[in-house]
Amino acid sequence: MLADLGYGSLIITLFISIYGASAAYFGSRRGKPAWVDSARNAMLLTFPLLTITTLSLLYLLVNAHYEFPFVSQVISNTMPATLRITALWAGQAGSLILWSWLMSAFACAVMLRKWDRDREFLPWVIVVTLVTLAFFLIISIFVENPFLRYWQSPAGSVVTAMFQPGGMQLFAPLNGNGMDPLLRHPGMILHPPMLYLGYVSFVIPYAFAIASLVTGRSDDRWIRITRRWALVAWLFLSLGLVLGMWWSYGVLGWGGYWNWDPVETASFMPWLTGTAFLHSVMIQEKRGILKQWNMLLIILTYCAVILGTFLTRSGIASSVHAFLQSALGPLFFIFIGLTFIFSLWLLIKRWNDLKSTTEMTSLFSREALFLLNNLLFVGFFVVCFWGVMFPIITDAVGSIWQKLPALSNLFTIQKIDIRSDYYTLPAALLSAGLILLMGLAPLSAWKSSTFKTLARAAIKPFAASLLLVPILLLGGMRSWVAILGFWICGFATLVTLNEFWRAARARHRAQGESLPVALWRLAGKNRRRYGGYIVHIGVVLMAIGIIGTKVYTTETQQTISQGGEITLGQYTVQFESLSAFNTSDGRNIARAVIRVSKNGAYVGELYPRRDYYYESQQAVTIPGVRSTLADDLYIVLADWQPLSTTSATFKVYHNPLVNWLWIGGFFVFTLGMLWAAWPERESQAIPFRKPVQLTREMNGP
Amino acid sequence: MKAKNFLVEAGLALIASLLFAGLVSAQQPQPTPSDDQVNAIARQLYCPVCENTPLDVCPTTACAQWRDLIRQKLMEGMTNQEIKDYFVEYYGARVLGAPPAAGFYWLAYVVPPIIILAGAYVLLRALRSWKKTTSPPENPPPQTLSPPPQETGKNEYIQRLEDEVRRG
């Protein structure tokens, strides 16, 4: 019964979404505010309705209603209630419901803001948001319905259908398949909701951008309204990506965290265009230029969000044929194609209205450097997009090619996968360029910087950062890639910290405040700037972790008997014992005890293990990891003698600096973004006390 | 004459013994390669069956057999490149970490740089054309806390900062 309630809510939400979008359109076109208000109420209603759908689905999961194929595919009798809740996004149908529910929550939140100043945007924001929501609801109802049931005929055959076919009875298996064991990790439990929160948050700036285009407004109001939405979207997307990396590192047992898998890369693409957008909107706010470009970036980000969701869900990344066999594929292509063409058409229509009111005056101004930053981000997006699409293109072209004997005799085209080796060089070059720009841009001024002024501003931090090179060489570093990478990181860090120091010291002199108070108040006065700088520090920390692991990771694999040792760098690991046992939640665990020494001194024990899940007949490798700020020792139980357990094969990785990746990606990113997005209080005037002293200080002796 | 015959026979015997020794050594099996030697090659190859999993870490039985195959090929004296070529021949170019830069696959490498360079060209032209339209003002208005470190820049910075401090 509850399932019918959930399904009914889903259907009603679809009708309400279609009604709301139509009413908003009609109300705007005919100048009838009552219709727009009605559309607004419809949009507010989508959230409670989809909450009913989501809760009913959760009820089915928690109470193990195996008569629903979705439930039986993602849970089993041995799974605890907490895991059954997270199973909502373990399957395609449930994750699409989650997407819609989050979308409706954000739609509802945006409706609750004050619209007095921006009444003209309201109908078009409703249209865009509800059309997007309706598309996902159509998929949930007609293609990936989680409320379908099993029905059994008297002859024993089982079919799936929403309603009872004639002569058939409801069929409920005694147990389900259970969630993929790989997904039972904290990183993967949090990763999809975070990613989806990022995705749906970016729909809001897109909706406002379209509203701005439709209404013909050429100012930056839409950007100012959606600034916080974009920041929050970026934070969620970033956290989603880093959680995915953390999951990969913790559960896949390969010692790495990012492998340029098409699904990973697809979720990275909206982050790239979104980050370019966050930088680019600052130019429009400060200088009133690049209006068309910002529109294009948010359109690209929206399309990348839809593309990211469907590349994950459609199976297109593995095979174009599987993709085309599913109804999801054509629907996806039609929707993304139509929205992209419609958005571009609107942009082209308003192109002249969006021409800049002011001009760029210097190639070395901050806005010019931001533009270069945008070029690199979009270049990175192009590399990723092409890498993700190339297997699909070769698959499709190869199929046609084979049917043309005259051409296929010349050379063959087979589906080719694009993997990490393809991305390594462009990713390294583009990232290095972006971090270098991160250091240079704060040194330039809006509008007025010339090459000379920029060079003068950069010379001191440049010279100071060069001191890092001999230090690294004296420390024994010989890889020029690592030295160059660390130097760029050092330069960006110096410039960023100097921005804090210089301004805080000036305020300290002028106001007589202590340095920490001056820093706190200064950062509080311009949250976006200083929040952005904190995020830049986070990026540098992540880069340090990436350089450390990419250049200096070492590994070895050896088979040893009990008491035997493996030495890797400063570490020696000794195999003490191995035991295999069953657990009450349906696992067989093979767990090794490893004694770890560093430079001959005992530092602790690690327990690498392999969990075999009987229900799903899948094994998961859980590494034993010793983490410090300097490095990780990461041990994988690769193989063992099942009966005697007296010898086993271990793969040992030494991953230097890897934890800076998590520190930068989780904590510093979050701190910076929360700082930047935190609502600012109205400023209060305070007396200005020591201007003369300040001027002396800044002018020097 | 006898001495001459002796020298010829001795020479022939030496050549024969060297050849024999060479043959014997060639027939001797190579030492069994270590897991690390196998993984060094397996790392550059991808499981032809599992999606996007490097061969050195893929836990499936099929991949374990492919690693054994690499070990066997190493014992036969094949080089790393020869083993990679062997895998490409049998399983296609999809086992490689990056597509071969040949035929249609060239497009994988050519298209992104062309788009990025075209973007850079458009950007440069746009910047130049924007710059030509107006000349830089004599005294640019203060826009940022970050100053050019020249006299006017410092004054701007101080002005901006003082404004900010005044606001609290």
Image (cartoon, coloured by chain):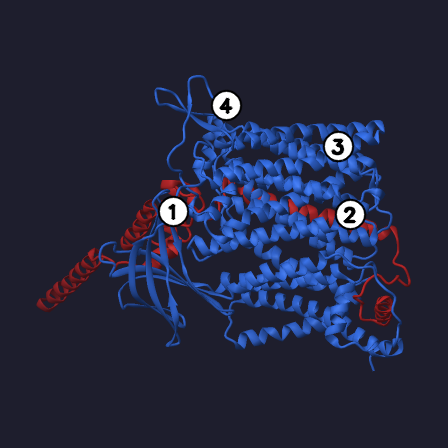
Chain colours: A blue, B red
Q: Position of residue A643 (x, y in %)?
A: 22, 55
The residue lying at 50 percent from left, 47 percent from top is A261
Residue pictured at 79% horizontal, 76% vertical: A513
Label 4: chain letter: A
For the residue marked with disc 1, what is the amino acid? Answer: Asp
User: Left or right: where does residue A341 sit relative to residue A596?
Assistant: right
Which of discs 1 and 3 lies nearer the camera? The answer is 3
Q: Residue A308 falls in which quadrant of the image?
A: top right
Which of discs 2 and 1 lies nearer the camera? The answer is: 2
Q: Nearer the viewer, mark 1 or mark 4?
A: 4
Cβ atoms at labels 1 and 4 below 8 Å apart: no
The amino acid type, in three-letter code, at marker 2 is Ile
Residue under numbered circle 3: A39
**Are labels 2 and 4 assigned to the same chain?**
yes
Please indicate, yes or no, whether residue A459 appears anywhere in the rendered image. yes
Residue to which mark 1 is pinned: B85
Q: Which residue is tagged 4?
A: A163
Q: CA distance from mark 2 to mark 4?
A: 45 Å
Secondary structure beneath disc 3?
Answer: helix
Q: Position of residue B60 (x, y in %)?
A: 35, 47
The vertical placement of A491 against A146, above or below, is below
Residue receiving disc 2: A225
The residue sitting at the front extreme is A1
Chain of residue at mark 3 = A
Look at label 3 and name its amino acid. Answer: Ala
Q: Closer to the observer: label 3 or label 2?
A: 3
- Quarter of the picture containing the C terminus of chain A is bottom right
Amino acid type, callout 4 = Phe
> Which of pointers 2 and 4 lies earlier in the amino acid sequence?
4
**Image point (77%, 60%), residue name:** A364
Helix, strand or loop at label 1? It is helix
